[in-house]
Amino acid sequence: MRRIIMNIVGLMRVTCAALSPMTCRLSALPAVVALTLLAGCAYTLDGKVVEGFGSVVMGRDKDPDARKGGLGGATVELIRDAGTMNRAVAARATSGSDGRFILEVPAFGAGWMDESWQIRVRRHGYENVESEVQLPGSTSGRLVIVGMHAGKSGQFREPDSSRSMIDEAKAFEPSLGNTRP
């Protein structure tokens, strides 16, 4: 999908360089419509929950862990911007009896924008698994393999919500809020 968008943007640049501003706006209309349609496409991530050591791996169907018997009844969540005040559950699924799950992510930019994502998994009788991940650009043949270790499950860890907006901004610009020159 990234390649399609880059080709559309490149075509718009070449076309607009040779045309007047009004003609450029009109010639960009098909590209804008195409981008709007692409933005509505959902990103789908397949996965499997198996016995393991509390890990999340972006693997493939043929990986040895993917061939293990699955753990059903696990709640799988994909969190966008997990460490920020804007964190949100982008997708949620429950693993089937074979351990398989599908996360349908309607969020714009999933898989091609450089963002912070977290997968967290909980199942009764197993320790929670929480891991930062980079979503693959193409999910074809890819499989999220979640290894869970028997133990006590609990509440998911939540980021400190007491941080204010100024604290959030100071992470990017430390001089914000200082009264001294």
Image (cartoon, helix red, strand yellow):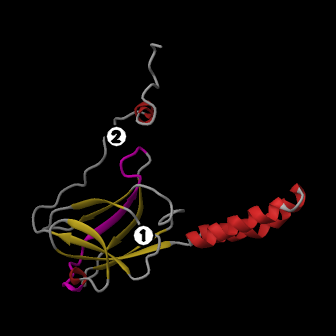
Task: Check disc 1 and give the amino acid type.
Answer: Pro
Q: Position of residue 111 (x, y in %)?
A: 47, 66
- The residue that disc 1 covers is 136
Name which residue lies at 44% across and 47% down: 86
Q: Is residue 122 above or below residue 169?
A: below
Name which residue lies at 80% across and 65% down: 15
Name which residue lies at 85% across and 64% down: 26
Q: Residue furthest top?
A: 180
- Horizontally, residue 181 falls left or right of residue 5, namely left
Q: Disc 2 or disc 1, which is closer to the eye? A: 1
Quadrant for the N terminus in the image? bottom right
Q: Does the magenta segment cover residue 99?
A: no
Q: Residue furthest left?
A: 151
Q: Position of residue 23 (x, y in %)?
A: 89, 62
Q: SS at mark 1?
A: loop
Magenta-highlighted residues: 67-85
Residue 163: which quarter of the image?
top left
Residue 125: which quarter of the image?
bottom left
Give the mark nearest the N terminus, 2 or 1.
1
Task: Check disc 2 and give the amino acid type.
Answer: Ser
Q: Does the magenta segment cover residue 75?
A: yes
- The residue that disc 2 covers is 161
Name which residue lies at 41% across and 51% down: 87
Which numbered tag is attached to residue 38?
Answer: none
Q: Position of residue 180 (x, y in %)?
A: 45, 13
